[in-house]
Each structure stands twice: as C-alpha cells, then as structure tokens.
Image (cartoon, rainbow, N blue to C red):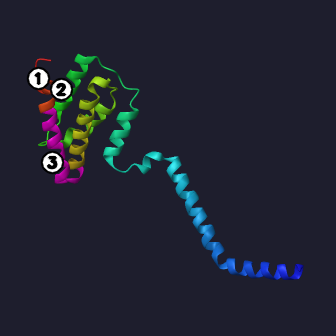
C-alpha cells in the first residue's frame, strides 16, 4: 500500500514540475506589484483630475479664510485663469490646493480647481477638449458666482 502511494505521489510531482517556475514567477510578479502600489499609492492615480479631487478632500493644513478674504483670493485667482493664456493655470491650481475652504465655498473652490486643472492640461497637451472644458467651467463660474468678477471686493 505504501509503495503504491509513493508511486502516485511521484506521478503527481512529475505532472506539476513543469508548472512550478511559472507559478513562482506569477507569485513574484504579484508581490512586486503590491509593493509598488502600497509603497507609493499616488502612482495609482494617473488622471490629474483624480489627483485634484484627492487633494481637495484631504486638504487640512492650508490657511482657512473668512468669507471676505476667501472671496478676494478666489476673485484674484479667477482673474488669472484665462483660456487665452493658460500658462498660469498650474500656479493657480497649486495656490487653490494650498487653501482649506469652508463648506460655504467648497463648490466654487472645486470648480476653480477643475478649471485650472483643465487649463493646465491644455497648456501641456494642447488638447482642445481640455480647453473647451475649461471655458465651460469658467463661464459657469462667472454666471453662478458674480462676486468673482466684482471689482469692489
């Protein structure tokens, strides 16, 4: 009986042997991918808008402005966002992401960041879709938040 089980065991090992290097390679690749992903989670986020969303959600360290100061900052940054000159978009986006906003201004702040991100995408890739998206967002901001263009603030 023992001799027969050894025979079947050898037969099983001989069937599995050719697949062992492949299985080992797959295990090593899976471990490598997991190490890369968990070592630098931001590398998983490839879309710039995803990065923008993540930064807005996680912003806790920047200065918090009162209503009038935030409106002035937003108005100044909005004035620097121009489809005709998208070169300042990256700088504007960085300034926006460095600010902690109150719930009152979260929506306008998000829209400003999205407009600057779209203009930044356009300045880097000359993708007309990014420019069109930025123009739409800027027009909506101008319409919905008239104080962004109010010079009396």
- Work out whether residue 100 or residue 76 is closer to the camera in this orientation and state it: 100
Depicted 105 relative to depicted 115: above or below:
above
Q: Give SS at disc 3.
A: helix
Disc number for residue 150: 1
Sequence-wise, the earlier of marks 2 and 1 is: 2
Indicate whether residue 141 is drawn in magenta: yes
Measuring from the top left, give residue 85's x and y in whole percent.
14, 42
**Mark 1 crowd level (few <14, some 14–19, many ≥20, 10 Å Cα):** few
Which residue is at a point 85% across and 82% down the rendered structure image? 4
**What's the distance in space between the residues labelled 3 and 2, CA to CA?**
21 Å
> Which sits in the foreground, 67 or 5?
5
Q: Are marks 3 and 1 in contact (CB under 8 Å)?
A: no
Q: Earlier in the sequence, mark 3 or mark 2?
A: 2
Q: Which mark is residue 75?
A: 2
Up/down of 99 relative to 132, above or below:
above
Q: CA distance from mark 3 to mark 1?
A: 24 Å
- Give the left or right position of residue 94, taking residue 15 as reference: left
Can you identify the residue that label 3 sits on?
132
Q: Which residues are magenta?
A: 124-142
Quadrant placement of the C terminus: top left
Figure quadrant of residue 81: top left
Q: Nearer the viewer, mark 3 or mark 2?
A: 3
Q: Is residue 19 above or below residue 39?
A: below
């Amino acid at each position: 009986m023992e001799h027969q089980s050894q025979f079947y065991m050898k037969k099983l090992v001989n069937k599995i042997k050719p697949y062992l290097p492949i299985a080992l390679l797959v295990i090593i690749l899976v471990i490598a991918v997991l190490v890369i992903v968990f070592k630098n989670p931001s590398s998983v986020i490839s879309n710039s808008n995803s990065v923008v969303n993540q930064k807005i959600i996680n912003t806790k360290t920047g200065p918090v402005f009162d209503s009038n100061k935030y409106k002035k900052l937003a108005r100044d940054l909005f004035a620097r966002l121009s489809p005709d000159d998208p070169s300042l978009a990256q700088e504007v986006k960085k300034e926006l992401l460095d600010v902690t906003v109150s719930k009152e201004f979260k929506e306008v702040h998000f829209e400003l960041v999205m407009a600057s991100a779209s203009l930044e995408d356009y300045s880097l890739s000359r993708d007309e879709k990014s420019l069109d998206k930025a123009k739409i967002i800027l027009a909506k901001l101008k319409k919905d938040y008239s104080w962004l263009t109010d010079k009396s603030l």
